[in-house]
């Protein structure tokens, strides 16, 4: 049963081939057996899962139906879950049990999903390798010596290893799409505001966005359907109707205009990945798409702009973790200043401290205009580039990452080298656009992803293109050895 997709599970439950309880027990046993190799979970919620599975089976017995009713998933451990530890991968929140459910958690629970647990992640979502977690690094199931990507590496590794069919994730600068590329999955970052951020512990509020990680575009469509929608509790949520994403999967790609930015194929891109991206382009051409070279001239400025804006917002968001109200508190503080210093110094890891310091510096008097304000102006230029491009093309295609997954620890001594791995993904977050990564092949036995970007609220277009591509290729069907 563990090889089934969300869509196959929905059909199996509808046809009474198995129950949600049977499926849940099988997956919990598989997690217990295999996850010690991967470290993809921080918390397992067996009691909750079995209770939700029994409820889902009862709802189906009473005539209810739904693609997510009885489907097992997991949540990235920054979505608040009532009465369950929500740690954000940090010592700071190791003892925090959320008093409420995040909107995404509540919506999916109402749809009938079964929560198997909370997945590991880079601390406070800061990282591209899932090595900064207080609970240890996550391993890539395709090669246990390599990273699974971050910050949603726990969700990605668990789905790739067939421990569960799909999981929630978040994307601040590529943290859904990059792990998807590294683990041979499909991952979708929706338009900013499409999925509620209420109850999603913030890293950078103007960049963070929740989305689905699954093996296929069809499964991402199913999970996104349950996640998306207006939320009055979230001031950045967009009151825009949610289309039926599954209904648009089978549209023709005839005449679809695909833009390929020339800036994507620079010296920093592994030539083997470039070759796979060109192969993907040819496959889409066979399906009727029209390819056009375009330019995104301000892309070169995106990384420095992002690594000013995101840390600045992080330094503000994380100021609440001070040892006073909740979270980690140091032992026997001498006074209030000592309480603040030691609680934050002991509770936050090195990467989080680094970004808080960078952000505080960028926002400080005398430097705000030179750094933060200038970065926001660059952000607008990046958005303008995309708006101009989408006047000429329907979607933009390119590599998700410049390199395949690197070895664990390989970039620990050089944070900037890790930051540069986000070069193709961060622009979508700066502009607030939807982006999707889908499997496109392998380099040295490690998966490679191709990225698709679309205009605002065109997630359905991305899912349609990815689904048609997956109907004509088999990269997404491949399973890591041993799983």
Image (cartoon, helix red, strand yellow):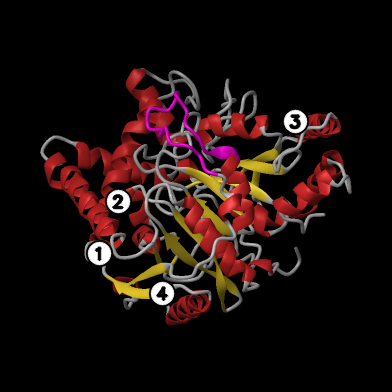
Closer-to-camera residue (213/43) = 213
**Residue that label 2 marks:** 306
- Point out residue 186 in the picture as x, y percentages from the top left corner: 57, 59
Q: Where residue 121 appears, x then y in whole percent?
A: 54, 46
What is the x, y in percent for residue 45? Answer: 72, 35
Q: Name the disc covering residue 48, or none.
A: 3
Pointers 2 and 1 in contact (C-beta within 8 Å): no
In primary-sequence order, the first of circles 3 and 1 is 3
Count neighbours of disc 1 (C-alpha within 10 A) and say few if under 14, some if 14 to 19, many if 20 or more: some
Asked if the magenta segment contains residue 237, the reply would be: yes
Q: Is residue 274 magenta?
A: no
Residue behind mark 1: 300
Query: Disc 3 or disc 4, which is closer to the eye?
Result: 4
Of callouts 3 and 4, the N-terminal one? 3
Q: Is residue 399 left or right of residue 376?
A: right
The 10 Å Cα crowd at callout 4, few under 14, some 14 to 19, many 20 or more, is some
CA separation in Å, label 2 and label 1:
11 Å
Give the mark nearer the N terminus: 4 vs 1.
4
The front one of 40 and 273 is: 273
Camera-nearest label, 4 or 1 = 4
| The residue stretch that appears in magenta | 226-243
How far apart are the two marked residues, 3 and 4, measured between alpha carbons? 49 Å
* Inter-mark Cα distance, 3 to 1: 47 Å
Q: Residue at (34%, 46%) from the top-left corner?
A: 354
State whether residue 6 is above or below residue 344.
below
Q: Which residue is mark 4?
A: 290
Residue 53's quadrant in the figure?
top right
């Amino acid at each position: 049963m563990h090889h089934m997709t969300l869509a196959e599970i929905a059909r199996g439950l509808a046809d009474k081939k198995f129950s949600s309880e049977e499926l849940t027990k099988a997956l919990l046993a598989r997690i217990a057996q295999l996850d010690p190799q991967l470290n993809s979970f921080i918390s397992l919620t067996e009691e909750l899962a079995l209770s939700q599975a029994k409820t889902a089976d009862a709802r189906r017995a009473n005539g209810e139906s739904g693609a997510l009713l009885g489907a097992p998933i997991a949540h990235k451990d920054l979505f608040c879950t009532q009465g369950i530890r929500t740690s954000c991968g940090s010592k700071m929140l190791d003892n925090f049990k959320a008093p409420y459910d995040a909107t995404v958690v509540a919506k999916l629970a109402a749809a009938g999903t079964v929560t198997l647990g909370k997945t590991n992640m880079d601390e406070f979502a800061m990282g591209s390798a899932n090595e900064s977690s207080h609970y240890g690094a996550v391993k890539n199931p395709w090669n246990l010596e390599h990273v699974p990507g971050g910050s949603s590496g726990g969700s990605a590794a668990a789905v790739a290893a067939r421990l569960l069919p799909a999981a929630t994730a978040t994307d601040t600068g590529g943290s859904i799409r990059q792990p998807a590329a590294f683990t041979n999955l499909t991952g979708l970052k929706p338009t900013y505001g499409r999925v509620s951020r209420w109850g999603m512990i913030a890293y950078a509020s103007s960049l963070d966005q929740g989305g689905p990680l699954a093996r296929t575009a069809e499964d991402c469509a199913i999970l996104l359907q349950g996640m998306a929608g207006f939320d009055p509790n979230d001031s950045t949520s967009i009151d825009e109707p949610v289309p039926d994403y599954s209904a648009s999967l089978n549209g023709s790609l005839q005449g679809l205009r695909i833009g390929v930015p020339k800036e994507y194929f620079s010296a920093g891109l592994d030539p083997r990945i470039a070759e796979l991206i060109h192969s993907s382009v040819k496959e889409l051409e066979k399906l009727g798409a029209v390819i056009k070279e375009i330019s995104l001239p301000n892309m070169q400025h995106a990384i420095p702009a992002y690594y000013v804006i995101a840390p600045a917002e992080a330094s503000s968001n994380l100021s609440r973790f001070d040892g006073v109200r909740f979270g980690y508190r140091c032992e026997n503080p001498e006074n209030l200043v000592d309480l603040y210093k030691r609680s934050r110094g002991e509770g936050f890891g090195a990467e989080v401290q680094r970004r808080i310091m960078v952000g505080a510096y960028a926002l400080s008097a005398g430097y705000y205009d030179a750094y933060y304000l200038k970065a926001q102006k660059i952000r607008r230029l990046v958005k303008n580039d995309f708006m101009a491009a989408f006047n000429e093309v329907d979607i933009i295609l390119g590599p998700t990452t410049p390199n395949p997954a690197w070895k664990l620890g390989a970039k620990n001594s050089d944070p900037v080298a890790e930051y540069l791995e986000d070069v193709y993904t961060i622009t979508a977050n700066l502009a607030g656009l939807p982006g999707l990564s889908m499997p496109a092949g392998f380099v040295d036995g490690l998966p490679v992803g191709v990225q698709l970007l679309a205009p605002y609220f065109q997630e359905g277009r991305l899912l349609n293109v990815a689904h048609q591509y997956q109907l004509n290729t088999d990269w997404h069907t491949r399973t890591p050895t041993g799983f």
